[in-house]
Image: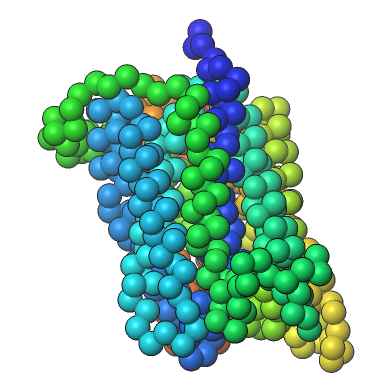
Amino acid sequence: MQERASRKGIWGWMLFDWAGQPFHTLVITFIFGPYFVNELSKNEVVGQTNWGYLVGFAGILVAISAPFLGAAAERTGPRKPWVFAFGTLFVIGSFGLWGAEIGTENLIWVYVAFVAAFIGAEYIIIFTNAMLPDLVPKKDVGKLSGYGWALGYAGGVIVLILVLALISTAPGSDQTIARLDPIFGLDASKGEPARAAGPISAIWFIVFAIPFFLFTPDRRKDKKLKAAVGEELGGIRQTWATIKKFPQLWMFFLSSMLYRDALVVLYTFGSIYAASVLGWSTFELGIFGIIAAFFGALGAWFGGWADSKWGAMPVVQTAIVLLLLVSIAVLSTTREAVIFIPVAEGSTLPDILFFICGGVIGAAGGAMSASSRALVVHFVTDKISMTEAFGFYAMAGKATAFIGPFAVALATWITGSQRLGISPVILLFITGMILLFMAKKRAGNDL
């Protein structure tokens, strides 16, 4: 029977989700992304197009290298050195986002900083995810995954509250919701509150990643990196050959690739859509983010509990259906209509619906993400190694990570509409749901 890691080791691992979440919450979703689209571009359509291409390009780089990194880590043994290396890249890139000042003509270094931070954030997840089955018995993997994800969302809630209380000004005011001047004299006219999202994410990560490095157990060193790299290509070929022997594996990886990419599109462009179509300020986006993150924490926690009771598969399937319905509701709502039904001028119904949708996106997305991480363990046990599996899982999640944002960018450019530009998310969810059903049917009693 597998031994359980110490309480401090498990908490150190869960705190890593807490440490990394602000980047996704502040930079990609609620603060810097909308700022990039609405303030650093000549109009919203151009901004959404450029943001889609930027996120897509970063996704391509992750997709190409994720399985190689997983294979190298599996053969060298310890994961923490990899986490430290890419954590450093993440921190440097996040600090670099401070240079995105309003009026800057050449944004190339902002692009480079974002790609570096994005890559670092995605790579460290590969190695920390791969440590999950070494910490607890298999029967508790889903629960621990859900609790870790819930803690990460809780970190997102705390960060957004701090941003609203100390940095972002309330509508029609020069002070924050706590009736304070923005800390450090941040000047909204220069975009400094939004630009601060990067450095805040970096500092938060540095502080809360410490318990992981101090207490979470790691594997012993097996081989030198040079020898490991020499074995990578052969190992990946062997892994692919193994995956092809089990149709349920490649169907699952392809399914997760699509439905997780659809969730990324919702996270990446949902707040951008709200900022442009509903005219939301950073304050409303912050409230939206708090709601999404709060219910995301509840959803991840409940998903972990439901996973241990009924299994990961029903949790993921239910979450996909909810997210599909929310996508349709969001894309059919504007200032003039709610789910295609006209509303009176000045009505708050569109805002209320978006806040509700934010809660559902958070809850369903949290549950789906946590249980999908557990599904990897259930699908690949006794078939391929866990680190290589999570390398492929990252690749599966990012192999279309460029297709989703690219599809949004292309649809936005062709139609000249932010609303129609996000419509590819519906097709991604539907296709992913069908493939997951097929994978489950093939797996039979293995799950």
Q: Quadrant of the C terminus?
A: top right
- Tell which of 295 and 7 is nearer to you: 7
Q: Could you tell me residue 53's position as x and y percent?
A: 39, 73
The extreme front residue here reads: 184
Q: Could you tell me residue 160's position as x and y percent?
A: 68, 59
Residue lying at 37% horizontally and 79% vertically, measured from the top left: 107
In the visual, does 48 lie left or right of 305? left
Residue lying at 33% horizontally and 43% vertically, measured from the top left: 85
Residue 167 image-quadrant placement? bottom right
Q: Could you tell me residue 173's position as x and y percent?
A: 78, 81
Q: Is residue 11 above or below residue 321?
A: above
Residue lying at 29% horizontally and 33% vertically, measured from the top left: 73
- Tell which of 57 and 237 is nearer to you: 57
Residue 362 image-quadrant placement? bottom right
Residue lying at 48% horizontally and 48% vertically, measured from the top left: 256
In the visual, does 1 lie left or right of 229? right
In the visual, does 176 lie left or right of 76? right
In the visual, does 169 lie left or right of 106? right
Q: Is residue 376 above or below residue 356?
A: above
Residue 369 appearing in the image: yes
Q: Could you tell me residue 37's position as x and y percent?
A: 52, 80
Residue 32 appearing in the image: no
